[in-house]
Image (tube, rainbow, N blue to C red):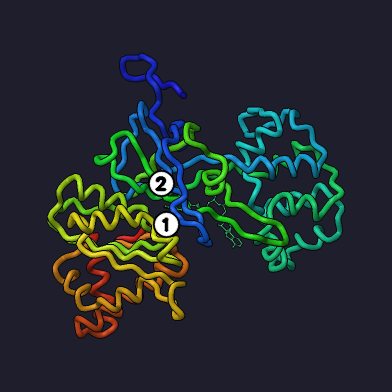
Amino acid sequence: MQLTIDQSNKSVPAPYSRTNPFHAKVLKNINLNGNGSNKETRHIELSLKGSGLVYAPGDALGVVPQNDPELVDALLEEMHWDPETAVTINKQGDTLPLKESLLAYFEITLLTKKIMQQAAGFTENAELQNLVLNENVGQLKEYIEGRDLLDLLRDFGPWNATAQDIVSLLRKMPPRLYSIASSLTANPEEVHLTIGAVRYTSYGRERKGVCSVLCAERVQEGDTLPVFIQPNKHFRLTESQDKDIIMVGPGTGIAPFRSFIEERAVTNATGRTWLFFGDQHSATDFLYRDELENYQKEGVLTRLDTAFSRDTAEKVYVQHKMLENSKELFAWLENGSYFYVCGDKLHMAKDVHNTLIDVIEKEGSMTREEAEAYLNTMKEQGRYQRDVY
Ligand SMILES: Cc1cc2nc3c(=O)[nH]c(=O)nc-3n(C[C@H](O)[C@H](O)[C@H](O)COP(=O)(O)OP(=O)(O)OC[C@H]3O[C@@H](n4cnc5c(N)ncnc54)[C@H](O)[C@@H]3O)c2cc1C
């Protein structure tokens, strides 16, 4: 832990932050998906005891991950490097044993144009020399996509480079952010996450998301994870307890809404709550089903609409459920409801956005432009908020 000097000139522990993360103990780490699911979504509970860290519903947690030891071993083996060689890791001249630096300090799963260009200085490989030429930038981009440092080192040897030369090309590992899935009021000194394991095959090799697969495969209860709070001013549960909220959160997008619902349950809010959830299969992928159905029974969750895309011949997504309920949805909006969206930025958030305009246009008997203006006004009023990634 870093120390700072306070006004009375005494050393006090620096508050935990991105550069000084808190080592939070893992209290629980379970798979929320059932047997036979195509997915693995971890529910992780961490202890914040003694950290002084606080958060509000809507905030994210930063996690500082470590690389996969198998991938690091493969790199060491490929290059015949001695794991214990000391390497300088930053401009300040700090050093670490090579293996540790590859595990904990450097990003080894992503390539950039700059890495490729600089690496070309350490090999005479004609293919790489050709790839980094300005006129071949398109091919370079294509090469980088879905490949990592191990591919680069395997593809373009022989290398005339020391371990130091190669690690000097690398960037520092960036932390990953996760929408917080718990309410601090409901779970004092705890923070919960909902993490989807990222796994895919690319160029004949199985690839694993650095942080999500660390959490899925290597983090056990009792271990610690370095974390910090990443406040999100633009995604906040309204403080007006009597206001209605509509939440659209398929897949891991459910995370902040579990926090919102928990918070509303403990604060006895009177506003209505409506959740749209979706995933592939109801039997295996209905995340937090029991909790949500209990909240519904207790009246904390007024409405729960679900869309399971692979249970029916025709794929059904959350936006279809919004359309099916367009009259009531618009009535909620007219009544001043807040509208929150969390999850996939690429497809879902766009589809939900367009569907919301469709609903307003249809049920408010407006032109497209008027419906868009209506949504813009909601945005200005802070009543349309998104946490998408
Ligand atoms: C504000 C915010 C909130 C978030 N909240 C959550 C959350 O609640 N839950 C959650 O699970 N995630 C959340 N994320 C995403 C999370 O931060 C990570 O990006 C995610 O877990 C992947 O990280 P990783 O280290 O496991 O994977 P990485 O090692 O970073 O790998 C992911 C990368 O792999 C590549 N990739 C993935 N699939 C393929 C494929 N099929 N083919 C080729 N390349 C591919 C892509 O380039 C992708 O960016 C959030 C992100 C942000 C910014």
Amino acid under disc 2? Leu
Asked if residue 226 is positioned above or below residue 200 in the image, the reply reads above
Of the pair 126 and 151, the residue shown nearer to us: 151
Give above or below for 226 relative to 366.
above
Residue beneath the point at 28% across and 76% down: 372
Q: Residue at x 39, y 63 (%)?
A: 250
Quarter of image, res 94: top right
- Mark nearer the N terminus (2 vs 1): 2
Is any atom of residue 206 visible in this view?
Answer: yes
Residue 112 picture quarter: bottom right
Measured Cα–Cα span from mark 2 to mark 1: 9 Å
Dividing the picture into quadrants, the one containing residue 292 is: bottom left
Mark 2 C-beta to ligand 1 under 8 Å: yes
Residue denoted by label 1: 252
Q: Disc 2 on helix, strand or loop?
A: strand
Using the image, determine if residue 369 lies above or below residue 163. below
The numbered dot on residue 235 is none
Question: Whole-percent x and y of residue 243?
Answer: 15, 59
Label 1 sits on a secondary structure element that is: helix
Relative side of 99 to 358, left or right: right
Q: Does residue 235 appear in the picture of this structure?
A: no
**Which residue is at a point 40% across and 37% down the rendered structure image?**
46
Q: Which mark is residue 193?
A: 2
- Horizontally, residue 8 falls left or right of residue 165, namely left
Q: Position of residue 150 (x, y in %)?
A: 73, 50
Looking at the rendered structure, the kind of residue marked 1 is: Thr
Ligand 1 has an atom within 8 Å of the beta carbon of the residue at disc 1: yes
Quarter of the C terminus within the rendering: bottom left
